Each structure stands twice: as C-alpha cells, then as structure tokens.
Amino acid sequence: MPSAIEQAIRQIVEEKGLQYEAVIDAIESALAAAYRKDFGDKNQNTEVKFNPEDGSMQIWDVKTVVEDVDLEELEHQEEERRQKAEQLALQIEEARKKGEPIPTFSLEEEEGLKFNPKTDIMVSEAKILKHNAKVGDVIRNELPQAEEFGRMAAMTAKQVITQKLREAEREVVYNEFKEHEGEILNGTVQRREGRVVLVDLGRTTAIMRPEDQIPTERYNTGDRIKVFVRQVGLTTKGPEILVSRTSEEMVRKLFAVEIPEVEEGSVEIRAIAREAGSRSKVAVSTPDESIDPIGACIGQRGTRIQTIISELGGEKVDIIEWNDNIVEFITHSLSPAKVTSVTLDEKEHSAFVKVNADQLSLAIGKGGQNVRLAARLTGWKINIGEAEKEASEVTEEKEEDNLTTPLTP
C-alpha cells in the first residue's frame, strides 16, 4: 500500500492535471527552503532528495569548482557595482522629477572577477574536500539530517510548494492551449471587464479584446460561442490566451470544419477578405475538374454555407471561384454585380471596371463594401465606372428616330 504522503501526491496530480515529477520537485524545493531557514546558512546551495514512500530525505550542499579569486578584490568590485547602481537609481529618479528622458544603461555584466559564494567553491578549498577536484567539477557535500522544523520554516515550505505548484499548473495550461493556437474552440462568455470580454475555455479564461469582437454581436454572461485562438503567450501572471471572432482565419477554419472537401484538400481556399459581422468574400479553387468548388462549399440546398453563416452570427458569405486570369478573377470578385469590361494598369496595379448603369450601385455595394472587399481579395486597386452604350445600340436609336420623323413634301 502506498504511504499517506504518496496518496496525497497522487491526488494532487489527478486534481491539478500535473506531472508526478513536478509535484515531487515542488516538495523538494520546499524542504530545501525550510532547511535553509532553520539549519542552514545563506551561502548554502541546498539540494534535497525526497522519498515519498517513507517520507525520508537526503540533503546536500552543492557547489561548482571555480578558479581561485582574490576575495578583497572581489569585495572591492562588488562595492563599485553597488555604488554605480545607486548613482543610476538617483539619475533615473532625477530625470523623472524633471520630466526628462530616462537615461539608458546596459544590463551586461562588466568583465572582472566572478564568484558566487552560494553556488561556487574555489579550487583550493575544493581540494580539501576532494583531493583531485578540478575547475568545473560539482562538489556535493552531504548535510546532517534535519530535526523537527520550526513554525516559520513550515510556513516557508508551504509558500514554496504553493508557488511551485501554481507555476507547474500554469505551464501545463500554457502547453495545452499552445497546441490549440490557430484553432477554433467552444467557449462560454464569463463576464465583461470594461470593453474586454472574458471567455471560459474550461481550464482557463481567454481574453477577447475590442478589436476581436464583432460590432453587431452582444456577448452576455453564459452565452456559448465559438472563438478562434489567435495567440497563446506566457506572462508573469500565467498563460495569456487571446481569442477572436473577427479573424479571417476563423472563416478558413469554419470552412475546414463544415466542408469535408476543404479539410481533405480537394477544395482549396486561396484568399479571404472579411469585414466581420457584415460580409466575407472567399476565393476557392480545386485541381480536380470533377469537383465544383463553389457547389461543394454551398452544399445541398445551401446547408453547408448556412451553417457557417450561422456560426458567424448571420454574416453574409460570397463564394468566388479563383482564376489565375486576373481579369476573370476581378470580374468574379465583384459578384453579384455583372461586369461588362475590365481594363488593367499593370504599372499602378489597378483595374478600371465598367458596369451597366443598373449594376453600378450593386458593384460598389453599401458604403463601398463590395468593391472594397473585391480589392482586398484580388490585391488590385479597383475603380468602377458606368459603361457607355454600345455603338450598335446608338445606331438603332438613330434609325428609329429617322422612321418617326415626318416626311416633308
């Protein structure tokens, strides 16, 4: 049967989702801190090996062998560094009071004697403990076993364990969600903090900033939403997960989830232009001539595209067939408007598009949205103008006028 200590460790591992070794490491760090508090000194680099089966432990003072140094010279250098740090602090404080730029400084260590009495031991002293010691060796000097720890040492151990377990849990959460970076996850709106929306993802809470929120949507506590994991970072306060509802990549991922041909690669999304909450244009293509890329995305009776639109909160989605011929691609991108002609200016990377008068407002779109999205989708600057009447139409009009003109005797 495992001991009570090991059972407690296993319970923590299961509840927190941590590695067994991480919990043991936290306990060993706590015991080392407690030992230094009651039985050690400030220059001991204490290391503890804990046995959870019987609660016993071994304790060492671990030092790395370095070259001999002149302690007086070392003390003199440390005093100089301390004085420089104090002067720099005064300069920064003075600059702040005067509103002047804060002076810059380098954090690089100066060349000179380097010796840390906590982690280092000079080779001459090391040879007393181990006659064949040389620079670079690690000396492990076993320390006497601790008796009962005092109240302060126990409090120190508790704080260290709490901190270490929190750090381990943060790392586990970070690694878990780092794997989901660039994916869509289900979440629940937790609450609002100012303009920021906090989304519960299960083991942690994600942040949805104002620029990642669709302006037409309202996020109420308890609402279940799909979010795109835009970025996962690790800060001093723990993992920071930024999610978005406005990213163009969210549209791409939804297409992959809802359309098998996109997921397997037989239909490829070549470009996306989006104004979140209003309209998106998606250019698709396929190397397989037997597949209709637009039909595959729309689905039978529009079921596939309607699911995507629903997930985007009613946002309109135009599916356009990609074409390597830029004239054809620009023509398609202005759908649903019908284009009569496209003239390219390669030097300016712009296109002048003509449409009939009854198509002009449709091509431009409300507030210029249709042409704006088409320009972003194609990568070309697009100007739209009204097409002139064809010469044949003008001739027919003139003939009609002649027929209706009264003949003079």
Image (tube, rainbow, N blue to C red):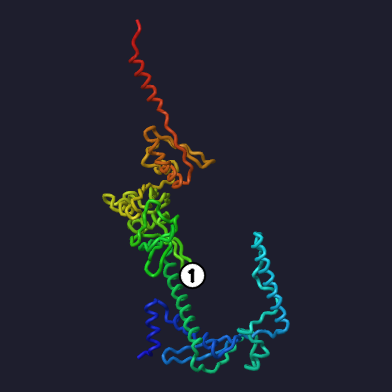
| Residue type, numbered disc 1 | Lys
Using residue 354 as the reference point, say whether residue 60 is left or right of it.
right
Counting from the top left corner in percent of width and height, residue 163 is at 48, 78
Alpha-carbon neighbours of circle 1 within 10 Å: few (<14), some, or many (≥20)? few
Residue 350 visible in rendering? yes
Observer-nearest of 318 and 212: 212
Examine the rendered structure and indicate whether residue 93 appears above or below residue 267.
Answer: below
Q: Which quadrant is the C terminus positioned in? A: top left
Residue 290 visible in rendering? no
Residue 371, image quadrant: top left
Task: Residue lying at the far left in this picture: please name it.
Answer: 301
SS type, badge 1? loop
Numbered label tally: 1
Examine the rendered structure and indicate whether residue 296 appears above or below residue 83.
Answer: above
Counting from the top left corner in percent of width and height, residue 26 is at 47, 82
Q: Residue at x 43, y 64 (%)?
A: 181
Q: Which quadrant is the N terminus positioned in? A: bottom left
Q: Residue at x 48, y 44 (%)?
A: 380
- Look at mark 1 in the image and give the residue it sits on: 237
Using residue 388 as the reference point, say whether residue 84 is left or right of it.
right
Q: Residue at x 51, y 87 (%)?
A: 48
Task: Residue lying at the far front in this picture: please name it.
Answer: 97
